Image (spheres, rainbow, N blue to C red):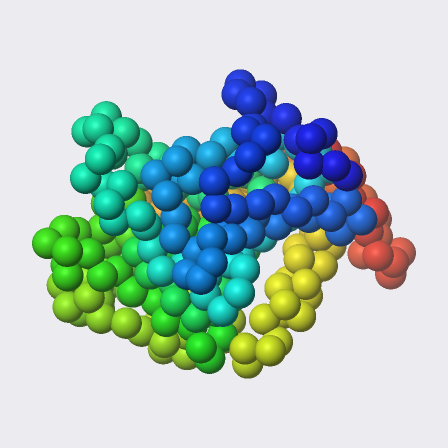
C-alpha cells in the first residue's frame, strides 16, 4: 500500500507532513503514525492539524484495521512547540483539544506505544488513544505549570477520569513525572514492558486486535466512549441497544458458528 493512495474524505493530506510520517502495512491491516522530529519529537502547531487529518483519513480507509501512534528514537515526544503557542491565534488555539482528540473519535482501535519522554501534548495524544504501551524508560508528565499554564488539549480532564482528582492534582499541579511502571499500577498504561520489547508487544497487540470482529470493535469503542459519563442505568440501556444491533450482524453469526464448529472465525466487519 502506498502513502499517496491514502485519501481524506473532506481534505487533502499534505504531501509533506510536519514532524511525523505515516507507514502503511497492508499485510497487517495496520498504519503507524510515527512522530519523527529528532531528538525529542516536538509536536508543532501545524502537526496537530495534520495529525487530525491523518487519523480521519486512516479511519476512512477500509484496508486499515489498527492504528499505532509511536515515536522515532528514544522518546515518544517531549511535548509541543512552546514558541508556537505565543504565535498562534486564539482561534487556532481553541482547536487544539479537537485535533488532539482525533484518536478517541477514530472508530478503529488506536495504540500509543511510547518509550522515554511522553510529556505535554505527547501525553495528551496518548491519553486519547485506546491502549497505552509503556516501557521501563517511559516518563509521563503534564509540565505546563512550569510555563505558567495548564494542559489545554484534554490532558487533565482525561487523566482525572482514569486516576481520580487526587492523583491528577499531584501530576498536574506539581508537574510531576510518573514512570511507565507507576502508570501501569495507576491504570494509565495498558502494559509496561522492558524497553527492548516495546515493538514486539505492539505487534502482538495489533495481531490480537485483528482477530476480533471489526464491527464489534467499533461498537465497543463507541459505546465505552459515549457512556463514560453516563449514569449506570443509561449505560446499561445503551449497551443493550448495541448488543441487539450486533445480533443481526454477519460477524456475530460467524462467531457463533465458529464457536460451535471449534474453528477460528473469519470476520468480515459486517
The answer to which quarter of the image holds residue 144 is bottom left
Image quadrant occupied by the N terminus: top right
Image quadrant occupied by the C terminus: top right
Determine whether, in the image, residue 110 is placed left or right of residue 100.
right
Out of 201 and 166, give the one closest to the viewer. 201
Measured along the vertical axis of the image, is residue 194 above or below residue 113? below
Query: Residue 226: x and y, percent?
Result: 40, 40
Measured along the vertical axis of the image, is residue 44 above or below residue 39? above
Out of 230 and 14, give the one closest to the viewer. 14
Query: Residue 55: x and y, percent?
Result: 53, 37
For image coordinates 31% across by 73% down, the residue present is 178
For image coordinates 24% across by 54% down, the residue present is 156
Query: Residue 152: x and y, percent?
Result: 23, 45
Query: Residue 177: x and y, percent?
Result: 28, 72
For image coordinates 24% across by 45% down, the residue present is 83
Q: Please, which residue is most extreme toward the top here?
A: 10
Mark yes or no: residue 248 visible: no
Out of 88 and 31, give the one closest to the viewer. 88
Determine whether, in the image, residue 248 is placed left or right of residue 17.
right
Amino acid at each position: 500500500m502506498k502513502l499517496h493512495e491514502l485519501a481524506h474524505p473532506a481534505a487533502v493530506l499534505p504531501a509533506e507532513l510536519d514532524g511525523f510520517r505515516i507507514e502503511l502495512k497492508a499485510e497487517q491491516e495496520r498504519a503507524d503514525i510515527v512522530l519523527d522530529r529528532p531528538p525529542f519529537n516536538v509536536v508543532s502547531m501545524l502537526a496537530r492539524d495534520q495529525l487530525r487529518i491523518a487519523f480521519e483519513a486512516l479511519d476512512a480507509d477500509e484496508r486499515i484495521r489498527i492504528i499505532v501512534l509511536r515515536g522515532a528514537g528514544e522518546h515518544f515526544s517531549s511535548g509541543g512547540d512552546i514558541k508556537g503557542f505565543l504565535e498562534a491565534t486564539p482561534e487556532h488555539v481553541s482547536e487544539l483539544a479537537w485535533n488532539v482528540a482525533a484518536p478517541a473519535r477514530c472508530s478503529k482501535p488506536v495504540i500509543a506505544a511510547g518509550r522515554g519522554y511522553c510529556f505535554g501534548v505527547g501525553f495528551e495524544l496518548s491519553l486519547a488513544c485506546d491502549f497505552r504501551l509503556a516501557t521501563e524508560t517511559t516518563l509521563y508528565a503534564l509540565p505546563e505549570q512550569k510555563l505558567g499554564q495548564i494542559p489545554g488539549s484534554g490532558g487533565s480532564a482525561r487523566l482525572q477520569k482514569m486516576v481520580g482528582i487526587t492523583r491528577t492534582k499531584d501530576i498536574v499541579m506539581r508537574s510531576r513525572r510518573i514512570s511507565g511502571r507507576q502508570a501501569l499500577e495507576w491504570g494509565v498504561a495498558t502494559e509496561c514492558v522492558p524497553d527492548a520489547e516495546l515493538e514486539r508487544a505492539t505487534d502482538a497487540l495489533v495481531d490480537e486486535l485483528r482477530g476480533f470482529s471489526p464491527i464489534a470493535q467499533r461498537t465497543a469503542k463507541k459505546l465505552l466512549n459515549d457512556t463514560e459519563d453516563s449514569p449506570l442505568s443509561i449505560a446499561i440501556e445503551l449497551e443493550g441497544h448495541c448488543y441487539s444491533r450486533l445480533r443481526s450482524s454477519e460477524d456475530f453469526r460467524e462467531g457463533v458458528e465458529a464457536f460451535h464448529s471449534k474453528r477460528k472465525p473469519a470476520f468480515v466487519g459486517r
